[in-house]
Image (cartoon, rainbow, N blue to C red):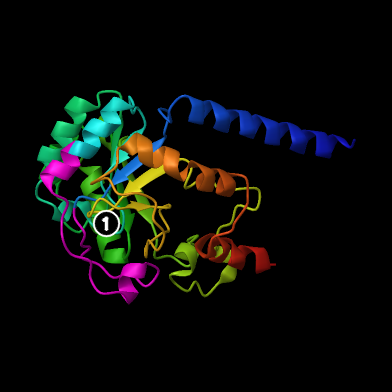
Amino acid sequence: MHWKQRLKQFLFVRKLLRYKTWYLQDCKHLPRVEIETFGRCNRACSYCPVSTNEKRTGRMSRALFEKIIHDLAAIDFSGTLSFHFYNEPLLDKRLPELSTMARRALPKARFKLITNGDLLTREKLQELFDVGFDQISISLHDEEIEKKMMALVEELSEQDQQRTFLNTFFRPDTVLSNRGGAVDIPDASKSQAFPEGCAQAHNSLIIDYRGKVALCCNDFAMPHDMGDCNTMHVREILQKRAPLTKAIYFGRYNLEICKNCVELSRNSP
């Protein structure tokens, strides 16, 4: 057998063993959980599905949020917890209070906030660090907000600067996703693909403001029943969807959203 084939076989077996270990350990090593506490975003970027759909409204009840956090505590969640999906987290005025409660219940978790920066001030940034956020990631969608956030970061202490990240999305060389076919990306070469398998669904649990679970971060329309945190325990949801996420993890793209997500890159030169 050629060494390249042996290497491919070895990597596949290692990947399979990692998956089995994760599943047998009750999914306790889930890397990432995203809880959307508020359904609206104040922007409508052309490369985001929000731009072509009616504004999403509504917010997660505190009771449901507490239930989800308690579920995560029950599986000893120690991955990264954030508070977004297709929303702007800072529109939810309860964010400091909710994150403080979550921090007490999940002492091993790493807390991350992803925001577009429109509502971010020096005082708000300090408040977020004070309530326990380990990392603030700011998505920059135009030059004006880029200048504003760069100036803000310069005012921070060296420690806080190391915990604050700026990510630009409006420049021509930005690598974009077609969000499972939900948006058009003019340059097909910009779309990302995972021909050997995609770990997005396997590595994350994404819950929208209604308590519904998405397949992955690209699942804007959520046409498939991945679970409902109102009536199901997080552990139960992870186990229910495991056969599907496993198939995707090993490159079996049977769902239309998965096919659309990788189609552009497969056709790219």
Q: Quadrant of the N terminus?
A: top right
| Overall secondary structure of the magenta section | loop
Query: Residue 104's quadrant in the figure?
Result: top left
Give the magenta-colored segment's residue range. 38-66
Rendered location of residue 110, percent (x, y): 31, 31
Q: Amino acid at mark 1?
A: Asn
Q: At 60% across and 52% down in the image, what residue appears?
A: 194
Q: Is residue 196 visible?
A: yes
Q: Is residue 59 left or right of residue 153?
A: left
**What secondary structure is marked by label 1?**
loop
Query: Residue 241's quadrant in the figure?
Result: top left
Q: At 56% across and 29% down in the image, what residue appears?
A: 20
Rendered location of residue 24, percent (x, y): 50, 26
- Closer to us: 225 or 154: 225
Q: Is-magenta flag for residue 47? A: yes
Relative to 180, residue 136 above or below = above
Q: Quadrant of the C terminus?
A: bottom right
Q: Residues within 10 Å of mark 1 (few under 14, many from 20)?
A: many
Q: Is residue 131 visible?
A: no
Q: At 9% across and 50% down in the image, what residue appears?
A: 93
Rendered location of residue 52, percent (x, y): 33, 76
- Closer to us: 254 or 36: 254
Query: Residue 222's quadrant in the figure?
Result: bottom left
Q: Is residue 35 left or right of residue 14?
A: left
Count of all numbered marks drawn on residues in the image: 1
For disc 1, the marked residue is 116
Rendered location of residue 198, percent (x, y): 56, 48
Q: Is-magenta flag for residue 114? A: no
Relative to 88, residue 124 above or below = above
